[in-house]
Image (cartoon, grey):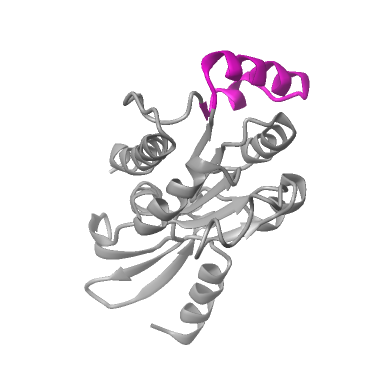
């Protein structure tokens, strides 16, 4: 790999931006396609497929065989609410490869002791979320049941390109949430992105079971969406 390509690739990875290295199998010639350049690239459909799946592989093109090496940021899970569900969800998500961040301004709950090995930010969402640079490789869940925390967090997440957004609460609770978000100018299309009630419908009762349902739904959104474009 040429030094200029390697430097550019390292810069993209450090900034949590996806990229694909295109290698001409016959000649060995390489070029780097950054995520924001994919739409204008002649290989757009193939590049999008590999970026979405995160998998590298060989492809046939009109110019011959190329090997596409996908560099995709690790998936991230941002949770608002240092609650009982989060205490199971955070380590489970970390086990399957997510970078997990807990955001909750209630410092009595948002402690390293309750979430060992997990980054915990004891700040309000409007302070904590912008620096995290939520992107298309981020899943976001709101679990506090407190509109003062969840609503601004959801509003921020809905303005970003995260692949999953979920919120804890019954249909009645979500109905009131929808009314509040609409009053703040959030569109129907944006609100429709929220998975609520959160998690797959598996009859979950305990906090741990709810965490299983949430992680399963996040995984389905990530992996099944990837299959749809494969």
What's the residue at 34%, 48% (across, down)? 49
- Where residue 62 sits: x, y (%)? 26, 55
- Where residue 191 sits: x, y (%)? 60, 24
Residue 187 found in image quarter: top right
> Could you tell me what secondary structure mostly forms the magenta stretch?
helix
Answer left or right for 152 relative to 85.
right
What's the residue at 57%, 36% (across, down)? 143
Q: Residue most toward the bottom? A: 3
- Where residue 16 sits: x, y (%)? 54, 63
What's the residue at 64%, 49% (across, down)? 109
- Where residue 153 sits: x, y (%)? 67, 39
Quadrant of the rendering where the C terminus is positioned: top left
The foreground one among 84 and 118 is 84
Which residue range is magenta in the image? 169-195
Answer left or right for 197 relative to 201.
right
The foreground one among 198 and 204 is 204
What's the residue at 43%, 84% (across, down)? 2
Residue 174 found in image quarter: top right
Residue 173 colored in magenta in the image: yes
Q: How many marks?
A: 0
The foreground one among 218 and 95 is 95
74 over 30 or under it: above or below: above
Quadrant of the rendering where the N terminus is positioned: bottom left
188 over 41 or under it: above or below: above
Residue 176 colored in magenta in the image: yes
Answer left or right for 181 relative to 24.
right
């Amino acid at each position: 790999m040429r030094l200029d390509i390697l430097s550019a690739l390292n810069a993209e990875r450090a900034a949590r931006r996806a990229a694909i290295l295109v290698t001409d199998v016959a000649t060995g010639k390489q070029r780097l396609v950054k995520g924001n350049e994919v739409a204008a690239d002649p290989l757009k459909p193939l590049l999008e497929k590999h970026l979405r799946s995160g998998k590298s592989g060989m492809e046939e093109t009109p110019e011959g065989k190329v090997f596409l090496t996908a560099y995709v940021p690790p998936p991230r899970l941002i949770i608002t609410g240092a609650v009982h569900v989060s205490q199971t969800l955070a380590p489970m998500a970390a086990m399957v490869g997510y970078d997990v961040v807990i955001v909750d301004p209630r410092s009595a709950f948002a402690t390293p002791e309750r979430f060992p090995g997990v980054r915990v930010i004891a700040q309000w969402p409007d302070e904590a979320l912008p620096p995290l640079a939520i992107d298309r490789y981020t899943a976001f869940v709101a679990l506090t049941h407190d509109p003062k925390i969840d609503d601004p967090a959801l509003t921020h997440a809905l303005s970003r390109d995260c692949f999953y957004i979920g919120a804890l609460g019954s249909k009645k609770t979500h109905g009131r949430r929808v009314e509040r978000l609409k009053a703040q100018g959030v569109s129907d299309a944006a609100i429709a992105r929220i998975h609520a009630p959160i998690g797959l419908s598996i009859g979950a009762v305990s906090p741990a079971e709810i965490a299983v349902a949430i992680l399963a739904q996040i995984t389905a959104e990530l992996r099944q969406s990837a299959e749809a474009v494969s």
